[in-house]
Amino acid sequence: MTTQVEKSDTRSYEILQYDCSTWVAPKRRRRVYPYQLEFNNWAFNLPSNSIEIKQAWSQISNDVDVLLTHGPPENIFDKNSLGLRTGCAQLLARVNIVKPRLHVFGHIHEGYGRIDSDSTIFVNASTCDVNYQPTQGPIVIDLELKDKN
């Protein structure tokens, strides 16, 4: 579910609320998924290897070009300050099937960075460091979208 609100500068903003959101541009799809593996008592938590998280990731459609999730897939910029891997195996499995051109996520501040695979550019765009200080600059991606065959 999404809600449109108007700001004083007359631009329209979208607020995400407890569900995925879709933006459709000509022949392109971008989706945002707020779900993440259980972490403290945060919103959108789903248990690892659960039916719920598998169902959440199954909502990622096969024609997504740009995928935004809160947390990382397994083994991709998911190592925290304790050296633990915190990414989601089910998310990685779905990304490997869908093969979006770009997958942007955050959550693990220590995992900031970009890596290009054969089919997907992965970006951990956490601008704050582990101490929640905004020390990590934005990552700019020039993305030429190609037709999926």
Image (tube, helix red, strand yellow):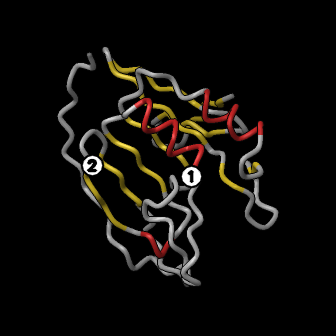
Whether residue 80 sits left or right of residue 29 in the image: it is right
- SS of the residue at dot 1? loop
Q: Are marks 1 and 2 in contact (CB under 8 Å)?
A: no
Callout 1 environment at 10 Å: few (<14), some (14 to 19), or many (20+)? some
Amino acid carrying label 1: it is His
CA gap between label 1 and label 2 equals 20 Å
Question: Mark 1 sits on what residue?
Answer: 70
Residue closer to the observer: 73 or 5: 73
Amino acid carrying label 2: it is Ser
Question: Mark 2 sits on what residue?
Answer: 117
Which image quarter is the C terminus in?
top left
- Nearest to N terminus: mark 1 or mark 2: 1
Q: Residue at x 49, y 32 (%)?
A: 31
Whether residue 19 sits left or right of residue 71 in the image: it is right
- SS of the residue at dot 2? loop
Q: Residue at x 44, y 76 (%)?
A: 134
Q: Position of residue 85 (x, y in %)?
A: 56, 69
Q: Residue at x 56, y 55 (%)?
A: 71
Which image quarter is the N terminus in?
top right
Whether residue 113 sits left or right of residue 89 in the image: it is left
Q: Residue 80: name its quadrant.
A: bottom right
Q: Residue 24: name its quadrant.
A: top left
Q: Residue 65: name its quadrant.
A: top left
Q: Position of residue 135 (x, y in %)?
A: 39, 79
Label 1 or label 2, whichever lies nearer to me, is 2
Residue closer to the observer: 56 or 25: 56
Q: Residue at x 34, y 21 (%)?
A: 28
